[in-house]
Image (tube, grey):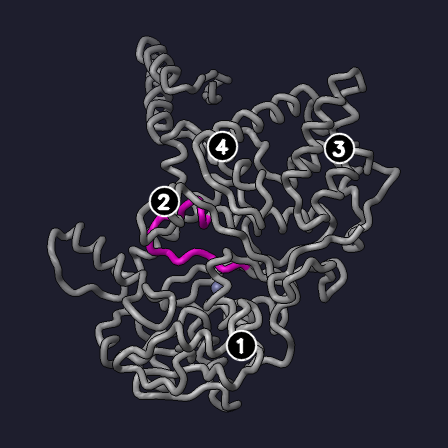
């Protein structure tokens, strides 16, 4: 059975065929590290993680690249305004120092690294798999400059007093991904006072540190003088560096379709010889109340918020994946509670059925590598087939979870429980949210009390150790002692 996915570019569901048999190259636009990511960001990264897991379960090797944007993403998402990273670094530095003062490049970078570390922590708590490569924009500047030079040479770009711009009129397919025309884009754009663009829809490949950008802290030398890259060129350079001129899959949030991904296509195709991407996948954004969620609006929910509400990040993972990626999820606390309960039920059932034994492991994958053919007869039982059918139908996660609950009900009617093991391994690996809670998902206060209790036990202060156990219990966690180690479980 072939995997079918909805391609944003052709606006239809397509059979997914990778360039190379058995291997998939995939690029995901990573976070701009100027604040803690929120559930809107997580949901798009989780879709990419789910897709990757499903491809791996199906027998493919997946080369997944996910970048870190640490320069060049301007406040207006277009060519105007401050750099998001620098703006936030100035704010943080002011608060820490209790006053103004000039920032150095090192200070800005070190604050960006703090946000990057937070992001990586969140990724871990959400059980996302490590990418094949995680390039940073600031470490890919020579590759960006090389692409810009080709674009200039081929007549797709031009230099002005304040930067180098891509000429959208030189690329007739500009607008195809987002369904825009150059005229539409132009009427929605404005030329900043000191920009000398030829066409309002042209976008920056490189900004010189002159005029309103004279104070820009993050800067590099280039053939066009000192400056910094535009946001879009970063992903064209990072994807090409690690995955080549053409990639199988490109994912992102729907907010990235325009201008970001539209510009990526223009740059990559005008400087390369092949169509840039074979299939584009976009996650619909989620709504938190009436307002669209964004860091700049301040109405965001982060992993610490989810923990403070008493939920595990894996409850959130379940919730965000339980809705189809092309359906707009209205995020509610009730929805999160329901997800928590549903996930518990599945996990309890998994415990009843028991863990996988070696025989089960040998039987997987239930699919012939790379051929996407379900290997029936051996391992691929009725439930696996139904589950796979849902996943192959444009990642129909609500359908796939429906199969899990259907199987659960059937198993209670007396069939040998052990016969569900291979199916449950498939479910566990695909969804990644039925793991026992990891340390990362336990609230900091509980972790602190656990540390204190460990110290008390080492000193054989059993009164203190018992008191701390009770205290941890009131926070909803149960501690058990296994030898010298303590294990903790959510009640
Ligand atoms: Zn990108």
Q: Residue at x 57, y 41 (%)?
A: 323
Residue 113 placement, left or right of 370:
left
> Which residues are drawn in magenta?
28-41
Q: Mark 4 points at which residue?
A: 335
* Structural distance between the alpha carbons of marks 4 and 1: 39 Å
Q: Is 72 inside the magenta-drawn segment?
A: no
Q: What element carries label 4?
A: helix
> What is the x, y in percent for residue 46?
54, 47
* Structural distance between the alpha carbons of marks 1 and 2: 33 Å
Mark 3 in CB contact with mark 1 (< 8 angstroms): no
Q: Name the residue under label 1.
A: 174
Residue depth check, mark 2 versus mark 4: number of the one nearer the observer: 4
161, above or below 280, in the image: below
Res 322 quadrant in image: top right
Q: Mark 3 points at which residue?
A: 422
How would you classify the magenta stretch by its main secondary structure? Answer: loop
Image mark for residue 300: 2
Q: How crowded is mark 1: few (under 14 residues within 10 Å), some or many (20 or more)?
A: many
* Structural distance between the alpha carbons of marks 2 and 4: 16 Å
Residue 205 visible (yes or no): no
Nearest the viewer among 320 and 242 is: 320
Mark 2 in CB contact with mark 4 (< 8 angstroms): no
* Structural distance between the alpha carbons of marks 3 and 2: 39 Å
* Structural distance between the alpha carbons of marks 4 and 3: 29 Å
Residue depth check, mark 1 versus mark 2: number of the one nearer the observer: 1
């Amino acid at each position: 059975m072939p995997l079918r996915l909805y391609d944003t570019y052709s606006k239809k569901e397509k059979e997914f065929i990778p360039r190379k048999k058995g291997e998939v190259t995939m690029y995901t636009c990573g976070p701009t590290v100027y604040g803690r990511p929120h559930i809107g960001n997580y949901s798009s990264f989780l879709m990419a993680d789910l897709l990757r897991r499903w491809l791996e379960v199906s027998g493919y090797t997946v080369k997944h690249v996910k970048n870190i944007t640490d320069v060049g993403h301007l406040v207006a998402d277009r060519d105007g305004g401050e750099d998001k990273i620098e703006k936030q670094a100035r704010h943080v530095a002011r608060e820490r120092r209790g006053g103004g003062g000039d920032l150095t490049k090192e200070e800005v970078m070190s604050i960006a690294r703090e946000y990057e570390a937070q992001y990586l922590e969140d990724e871990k708590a959400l059980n996302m798999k490590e990418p094949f490569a995680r390039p940073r924009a600031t470490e890919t500047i020579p590759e960006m400059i090389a692409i810009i030079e080709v674009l200039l040479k081929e007549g797709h770009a031009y230099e002005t007093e304040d930067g180098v711009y891509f000429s959208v009129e030189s690329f007739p397919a500009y607008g195809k991904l987002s369904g825009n025309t150059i005229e539409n884009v132009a009427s929605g754009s404005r030329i900043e006072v000191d920009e000398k663009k030829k066409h309002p829809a042209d976008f920056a490949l490189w900004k010189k540190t002159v005029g309103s950008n004279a104070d820009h802290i993050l800067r590099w030398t280039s053939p066009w003088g000192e400056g910094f890259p535009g946001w879009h060129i970063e992903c064209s350079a990072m994807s090409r560096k690690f995955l080549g001129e053409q990639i199988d899959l490109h994912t992102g949030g729907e907010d990235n379709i325009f201008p970001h991904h539209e510009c990526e296509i223009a740059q990559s195709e005008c400087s390369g010889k092949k169509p840039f991407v074979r299939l584009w996948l976009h996650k619909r954004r989620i709504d938190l109340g009436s307002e669209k969620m964004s860091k700049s609006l301040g109405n965001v929910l982060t992993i610490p918020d989810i923990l403070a509400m008493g939920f595990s990040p894996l409850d959130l993972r379940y919730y965000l994946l339980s809705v189809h990626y092309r359906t707009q999820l209205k995020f509610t606390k009730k929805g999160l509670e329901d997800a928590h309960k549903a996930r518990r039920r599945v996990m309890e059932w998994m415990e009843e059925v028991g863990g996988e034994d070696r025989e089960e492991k040998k039987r997987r994958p239930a699919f012939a590598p790379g051929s996407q053919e379900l290997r029936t007869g051996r391992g691929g039982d009725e439930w696996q087939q139904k589950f796979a059918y849902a996943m192959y139908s444009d990642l129909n996660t609500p359908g796939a979870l429906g199969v899990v609950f259907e199987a659960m009900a059937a198993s209670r009617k007396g069939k040998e429980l052990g016969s569900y093991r291979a199916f449950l391994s498939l479910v566990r690996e695909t969804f990644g949210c039925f793991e026992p809670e990891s340390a990362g998902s336990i609230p900091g206060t509980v972790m602190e009390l656990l540390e204190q209790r460990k110290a008390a036990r080492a000193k054989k202060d059993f009164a203190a150790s018992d008191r701390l156990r009770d205290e941890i219990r009131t926070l909803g966690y149960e501690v058990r002692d296994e030898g010298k180690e303590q294990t903790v479980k959510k009640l």
